Amino acid sequence: MNQRSSPSTGDALLAMRDATRVAHAGPAPRLQGGALNPPVHRASTIVYDSVEKYMARHQGLYDEVIYGLYGTQTTYALSNAIATIEGGQHCVLTPSGTSAITLALSAVLGAGDHILVVDSVYGPTRRFLDEVLTRFGVAIDYFDPLAGAAIADQFRDNTRAVYMEAPGSQTFEMIDVPAVTAAARRRGIVTLLDNTWATPLYFRPLAHGVDISIASATKYLSGHSDVMLGALSTASDALYETLKDMAARFGICAAPDDCYLVHRGLRTLDVRLERHQRNARALIAWLQGRAEVRSILYPGLEGDPGYAIWQRDYRGASGLFGVLLDPMDMREASAFFDHFTLFRMGSSWGGYESLIVPAWPAPIRQYRPTPSEGALIRIHAGLEDPDDLIADLERSFARLGRARGR
Ligand SMILES: *Cc1c(COP(=O)(O)O)cnc(C)c1O
């Protein structure tokens, strides 16, 4: 059964605003026995009551429920909801953001192809390219996140794809996405963008010419730090079929229970993001007044190198930002990081809780290497009261000051 949006709200929802879309995207209750939320359909085997129906299954209809591997009603409820929010036609769900990335890259690239990848890309994406795809005969070059239309100078005859992520992991550089996608489109090059930071609510990759929009749904879409999921969205029927086929070839499927959790998180995405942004801005305003702070990396901040692009293309900024502090040795770092009351240290972000981690990026960058002087830290502003978070930071700076003997 195709459950794209719902007959009652489906097309109408596409014309509505984001807060309404996230609240309502998915099947109509009457398609699921009146249950308001999509029930969890767990299945491997789907049975048929006639040989005719069995033989007729899977006639190139990619949203059919025919085997658990390809998705159940719960999977399609969420993939259709995300497609609606992305402003696309299609979405493929995967068990993690990382698997979404590796699936998309494997689907569009083959031996002899060349790909251009933004130099500020998420570390595990870079490792998959350098350590895995090179073994299968893919040639990889990195490009300056600030290249814009000049990326065309790096196109080769065999350039098949351009991979972007904005803002950059750890360093938060922005990309002139429309300039890059326009240049790529003229050459028939596929463009992919990891949009995890902004989510489709604050930046619409597909509306800016991107062919495949990538989200780690583990982060804001789920919002509660208790589930892993990835999403690939596209407006192209051909790319959707390629992605869906490749997921089947690799045997990749998102678990219905996980899809349910992310669908539940989606309902509050708009209000959560609003609060994440407000808290991030409150922390940043306070940090800017501290003598220990050298700079803030946050494209939504006036004066940030990415601000002009952010203001032109984005509807909001999320809760993740970088802070460059004066250099600290390990003893000072322990004084600073080890005794927070609210901020926790851990990978990932996008949940309800505030996080703080050192982000000394590995020296692998070709363009605009990260500052070698100073200590770069990464903060995720959670949903707590900002004054409590500021008090927590203040105590930590006091401990750092004592460790430095001032
Ligand atoms: C976390 C993250 C990923 C990977 O997502 P997982 O769900 O953790 O596999 C990819 N890209 C970005 C930008 C991320 O922050």
Image: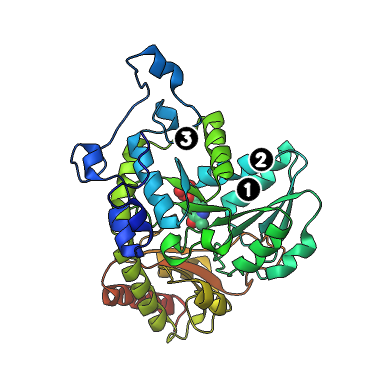
| Secondary element at image label 3 | loop
Using residue 168 as the reference point, say whether residue 339 is left or right of it.
left
The label number, if any, that marks residue 216 in the structure image = none
Using residue 264 as the reference point, say whether residue 324 is left or right of it.
right
| Secondary element at image label 2 | helix
Circles 1 and 2: CB atoms closer than 8 Å: yes
Q: Nearer the viewer, residue 306 or 359?
A: 306
Instruction: Please report the residue visible at 63 percent of the width from the left and 51 percent of the height from the top.
Output: 126
Specify the amino acid type for callout 3: Tyr
How crowded is the residue under tag 1: few (<14 C-alpha within 10 Å), some, or many (20+)?
A: few
| Quadrant in the picture for the C terminus | bottom left
Residue 400 position within the rendered picture, expressed as x and y whole percent measured from the top left = 42, 75
| Secondary element at image label 1 | helix
Residue 234 position within the rendered picture, expressed as x and y whole percent measured from the top left = 52, 50
Which is nearer the N-term, disc 1 or disc 2? Answer: 1
Question: Would residue 218 be visible to someone looking at this image?
Answer: no
Nearest to viewer (mark 2 / mark 3) = 3
- The residue where tag 3 is placed is 62
- Tell me which colouring the rendered structure shows: rainbow
- The residue where tag 2 is placed is 132
| Quadrant in the picture for the N terminus | top left
Instruction: Please report the residue visible at 49 percent of the width from the left and 62 percent of the height from the top.
Output: 204
Give the quadrant of residue 344.
Answer: bottom left
Q: CA distance from mark 1 to mark 2?
A: 7 Å
Specify the amino acid type for callout 1: Arg
Which residue is farthest left? 34
- The residue where tag 1 is placed is 127
